[in-house]
Image (cartoon, rainbow, N blue to C red):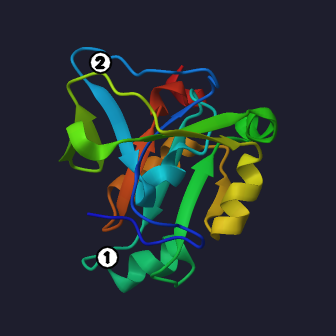
Amino acid sequence: MSAPPYRGEGTHALWHVSEDSMIERFEPRDGRVWAIDTRHLPLYWFPRDCPRATFWAVEETTDDDVDRFLDGDRSHRVHVIEPAWLEGMRSTQLFAYRLPAATFDAEDRYWISHTAVEPSQCIELPDLLALHATAEIELRIAPKLLELWERVFASTLDFSGIRLRNATLAR
């Protein structure tokens, strides 16, 4: 399922996000080059190792879960990090590489190419907090991210959890 659109989303494209500004070619790792589409690009507006829980409503989401997690707004998108990562959100510089779609196949929310890919564009993403604010994606800070994650996982929301093994209580 797809996340809801965000303000300023732009047209569909495939992207790879990195802290490295000098990538000229993406070589397959374990036989794959991974990409994300524009709709799901905000899932990567974080320092690479930052644990995050992201969630939103889908058709099956109950009104109770919308009230509990999304402040009663079905179009709301929420991203959550731990307090320790706030400084990284302020200081990390990311780069979004636009990738040609020709060799990619869709696999859930991700896109996979089994051959090397050269990016057609590199866009600097200098202010991760401003990206969230401009896109009208709420960024929450939760001291107990994994406890929140368990509640989201058990809910009727759609979600994505990335780098959760790096969460404070996971160490």
Is residue 72 shown left or right of residue 21?
A: left
Name the amino acid, label 2.
Answer: Pro
- Left-right relation of 26 to 22: left
Query: Mark 1 or mark 2: which comes first in sequence?
Result: 2
Front-lying residue, 151 or 77:
77
Pinpoint residue 47: horizontal percent, then vertical percent: 63, 33
Above or below — where is 6 with respect to 107?
A: below
Residue receiving disc 1: 61
> Tags 1 and 2 in contact by the CB under 8 Å rule?
no
* Residue 119, quarter of the rendered image: top left
Which residue: 65% across, 49% down? Answer: 142
Mark 1 or 2: in front is 2
Q: Pinpoint residue 159: horizontal percent, then vertical percent.
A: 38, 56
Q: What amino acid type should be assigned to the residue bearing mark 1? A: Thr
Number of marks = 2
> Where, by quadrant of the figure, is residue 74 drawn?
bottom left
Q: Residue at x 22, y 49 (%)?
A: 108
Task: Looking at the picture, tell me which residue is in the foreground, 28 or 122.
Answer: 122
Q: Which residue is mark 2?
A: 28
Q: Quadrant of the N terminus?
A: bottom left
- Which type of secondary structure does the marked residue at label 2 adopt? loop
- Left or right: 92 in relation to 120: right
Q: In the rendered view of the protein, which quadrant contains the C terminus?
A: top right
